[in-house]
Image (cartoon, helix red, strand yellow):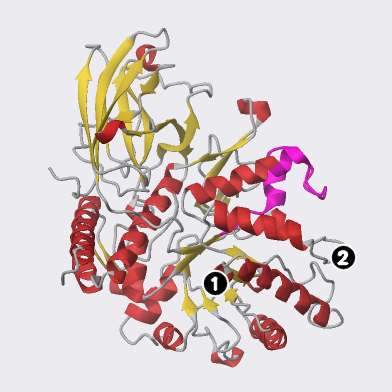
Amino acid sequence: MKGGLFPLLLLVPLLVSAEVKITRVDAMTRVMRDQSPPDQVEAIEAARGEVESLQIVLRGSPEEIQGARLEVTDLSGPEDREIPAPTVLREHYVKVTRSTPMAPLPPGDYPDALVPQSFDAQELPALEQVSQPWWLDVKVPYSIPAGLYSGDVTARAANGSELGRTKVLVRVSDFDLPVTPRLRTSFMTVWRRIAEVHGFDRQKEPPSPALSALLDQYYQMLADHRLSIDQTYPTYPDGRTGQLDEAAVEAGLRKQLLHRHASTLGLPIWQEWPFPDPLGHDRAEAMRYCATWMKLLHKIKAGQRGYIIMGDLDEPNSASAYGLVRRWGDFFNEAEALHGVRMPLLVTEQPSPDSWWWGSLDQFVDIWVPHFSSVWEDLEKEGGRRDITRRLKAGDEVWCYAALVQMPEAWMTLHGKPAQLKDSHPPVWCLDFPAMNHRILSWLMARHGLTGLTYWDTLYASKGVDVWTDAGTFHHPSGEIYNGDGSYLYPATKKRHGSDQPIASIRLKWLRDMCDDYDYLMLARDLGLERAALREADTFARGFGDWKDNPNALMGARRALAALIVKTQQVQAEGGAR
């Protein structure tokens, strides 16, 4: 096989213990404790610069599996170059006691948190045979030559005896992902919440050195998964005066945008912070502050990555709320005119108001963020207003967002009011929904010209919920429970785990892979392959209300798209026509 082919990773299992079974499982399958998964993974594919994942599952008696570990070597390849050993994380299970509304998956124990092997192992259930999966992240460097790379994985029991071995092969091509993700994202994670869940004083400012180091870990964790946190503390003004330490803020911007390669970063401002009356008495000073912050972005050549998101303007749902958005839109429009720097305002709302009595937000909002269901209503429902298309043509951006389970009445009627959501519905990001709900988004967004995603929290838990045992993170006032909603990171604490650090979830990995899919689609578009990409997506992803829960179709389209990208890049490099 030629080096220009798309990267291929193969694993060949070699059994050593007759009692313990070792299998390979793809990254979109969750392995339940009582399942004996077949050996599924024949090829895991990744571009250069990409992180791709697979699972290694040990199945045997609890006595044999408890405390087991995986050992992984570097992967050797052409010209004596190496891919660093994959990161190995043990999968930790949480319980779904009550299903999310309309969830197609049953209650039970689900693997989700991905903990270091140095953490104490979760006690295994008392079953005759039990499965314990590990998660492997293989990061393909940009600098390595194309070709085949090979390494080994060894499973060992708690006493050190060998349980099984697996050969790891990776084939790398000359196909690179962009360093900075093309998908623009804003994932809210408030620094005071991080402080609170780790036992720090959430009111103390500035944060202690220990808390500041922990905040950096959270910022880095999201960036490592191709996602951007909404704001970072090092880019904040003095909360008492509103003054900026320009050198310190520039350093914070550089770290987040140029070192971590985050796709976006939000300007820190709220309705009464850092100025008590920014729309009135403090208006001129607040405008200067906003302009100075945005100009620092331009100074480091990252001006297009800045935006404004304000919790006070989230999901406006009344005439007064719409009026407040317009007042802030006027504020930023005036500031742009006075100071000569763009200040795009993001609002989580669709361009069509629920009531025309509220008035329009046109010219006041720069980045519209409708819920997934509102995208379906506007662009795909028969008779939809198509206002998203109108705002895109006017030069605005349109992103989208997930929250809870929100099915439009028109969709419910069209589909016979189903009790469970299988597929072809506006995606749901709850834990007891299939993986495709996370992974499908990039294919749908690219079809409609949507360029970003927002999400409301990554560390949320309703009062009394222990996220390490209970998946029911969001308790709605109606009494409904939304499993995993608002929770993509698990807070490991010094008291409970021996150290303070963020722990990724499997669902966070799915979002990372979704961002990579978007990069594939944008690379294809840049090469003039947009129509070919949409033809591939037609097999499984035709719209927010028309997609299939078929991971094999997605992976097949991804392989085909990658092959087109590689071939076209090679032809263009040789100076030929497509």
Earlier-in-chain disc, 1 versus 2 = 2
210 drawn magenta: yes
Pick the front one: 474 or 272: 272
Q: Label for residue 102? A: none
Position of the N terminus, as image quadrant, is: top left
Residue 271 x, y percent position in the rendering: 75, 72
Q: Secondary structure at mark 1?
A: helix
Res. 544 visible in picture: no
Q: Is residue 118 shown left or right of residue 26?
A: right
Q: Which quadrant, please, contains the C terminus?
A: bottom left
Disc 2 marks a residue whose amino acid type is: Thr
Q: Amino acid at mark 1?
A: Gln
Note whether residue 207 is visible.
Answer: yes
Residue plotted at (25% across, 51% down): 551
Q: Is residue 380 above or below residue 522?
A: below
Residue 401, given in percent of the width and then of the height, sits at 48, 66
Q: CA distance from mark 1 to mark 2?
A: 27 Å
- Of residues 238 and 392, which is closer to you in this image? 238
Left or right: residue 39 compared with residue 52: left
Circle 1 crowding by C-alpha within 10 Å: few under 14, some 14–19, many from 20: some
- Which residue is identified by label 1? 304
Residue assigned mark 2: 241
- Identify which residue, 306 or 466, lies in the foreground: 306
Left or right? Give the position of 350 relative to 57.
right
Camera-side mark, 1 or 2: 1
Residue 548: quadrant of the picture:
bottom left
**In contact (CB < 8 Å): disc 1 and disc 2:** no
Question: Which residue, as the protein is rendered here, is positioned at the far left?
Answer: 1
Q: Which residues are magenta?
A: 187-212
